[in-house]
Image (cartoon, rainbow, N blue to C red):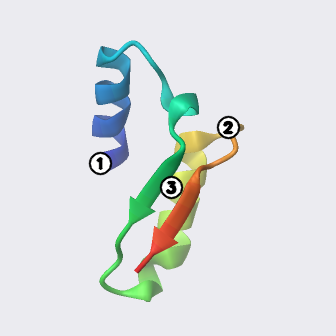
Amino acid sequence: MCLTRISHILESAGIDKTHVVMCRIYLKDMSFWKEVNRVYGEFFGDHTPPVQYMV
């Protein structure tokens, strides 16, 4: 849901996710890391994903 909203914001600015240079993701529980990483990879696809910080 969050990444979809970000995609809509980027589109409204006339750009796409290939313009993203950094993304911070905060996790309360690191056990979600694997799932977040999967969804993140699906969202960015072939674009080299920006640096992600997991806290």
Pointer 1 with pointer 2, Cβ within 8 A: no
Identify the image quadrant of residue 7.
Answer: top left
- Of mark 1 and mark 2, the one earlier in the sequence is 1
> Between marks 3 and 2, how big is the CA–CA gap?
14 Å
Of circles 3 and 2, the one toward us is: 2
Residue 43 position in % (x across, y down)? 52, 43
Identify the residue under disc 3.
Answer: 39
Three-letter amino acid code of the residue under disc 2 = His
Q: Residues within 10 Å of mark 1 (few under 14, many from 20)?
A: few
Q: Which mark is residue 45?
A: none
Residue 28 position in % (x across, y down)? 30, 83
Identify the image quadrant of residue 14.
Answer: top left
Check the image and name the residue furthest to the front.
Answer: 21
5 left or right of 25 in image: left
Of circles 1 and 2, the one toward us is: 2
Q: Does any portion of residue 34 appear in the rendered image?
A: yes
Towards the viewer: 55 or 33: 55
**Mark 1 secondary-structure assignment:** helix
Point 60% across, 52% down: residue: 41
Residue 6 position in % (x across, y down)? 33, 37
Three-letter amino acid code of the residue under disc 3 = Val
Identify the residue under disc 1.
Answer: 2
